[in-house]
Image (cartoon, rainbow, N blue to C red):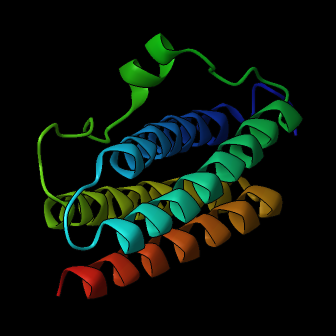
Amino acid sequence: MSKASNTPVVDALKQVLADTYALQIKTQNYHWNVEGPQFHSLHTMFEEQYKALFEAVDEVAERIRALGDYAPGSFKAFSELTKVSPPKDGIDGQAMVKDLVKSHELLSEQAKAALAVGEKAGDDSTVDLLTDRITYHDKTAWMLRATAA
C-alpha cells in the first residue's frame, strides 16, 4: 500500500489517535480530581482506563507510522483534531462517569467510521486494530453506565 493510496486510512486513524489521546487526558484528570463516597472505586477504575487508553494511543500512532505517515504528537495537533470534549471542572464523580460515557460512545463511533475507511481500502490490519478499539470503548461505556445507574 503506497502512502498516496492510504491517505484516507491515515486521516481516519489520526482522528482516532487524537480522540483517544484527549480521552486519556480527560480520564486521568478525573482520576486525579474525583471526590465523594465512590472515591476509591472511581479513582481505581479511572486509573485502569487511562492506562489502557495510553497503550491504545501508542498502538494507533504506530499503525499510522507503519502506513508510512507521521503521527501527530503535540497538544496543538490533538486539540485541532479531537472531537472529545475537555474535562469538566468541579463536577462530582457521577457527572464524571456520565461525561466519560459520552466520550467513549463518541470514540466508538469515530472508530467505526475509521473501520469503514479501512475496509474500503482493504487494510485488514487497520480493521483489526479498530475492531479491538470499538470493543474496548463499547465495553467501557457499558461498565461506566452500570456504575452511574
Q: Is 79 in front, or is 11?
A: 79
Where the N terminus falls, by quadrant?
Answer: top right
Where the C terminus falls, by quadrant?
Answer: bottom left
Residue at 79% from the left image edge and 43% from the top image edge: 63
Residue 130 placed where, x, y %?
Answer: 63, 62
Residue 6 falls left or right of residue 83: right
Residue 131 placed where, x, y %?
Answer: 63, 71
Residue 9 falls left or right of residue 146: right
Query: Based on the displayed image, in which of its 4 quarters is residue 41 positioned?
Result: bottom left
Residue 111 placed where, x, y %?
Answer: 50, 58
Residue at 28% from the left image edge and 53% from the top image edge: 34
**Is residue 117 at least partly visible in the picture?**
no
**Is residue 57 at least partly visible in the picture?**
yes
Q: Is 28 in front, or is 129?
A: 28
Residue at 26% from the left image edge and 39% from the top image edge: 87
Query: Based on the displayed image, in which of its 4 quarters is residue 40 positioned?
Result: bottom left
Q: Using the image, determine if residue 22 lies above or below residue 124.
A: above
Residue 50 placed where, x, y %?
Answer: 54, 53
Residue 127 falls left or right of residue 82: right
Residue at 66% from the left image edge and 35% from the top image edge: 10
Q: Is 84 in front, or is 64?
A: 84
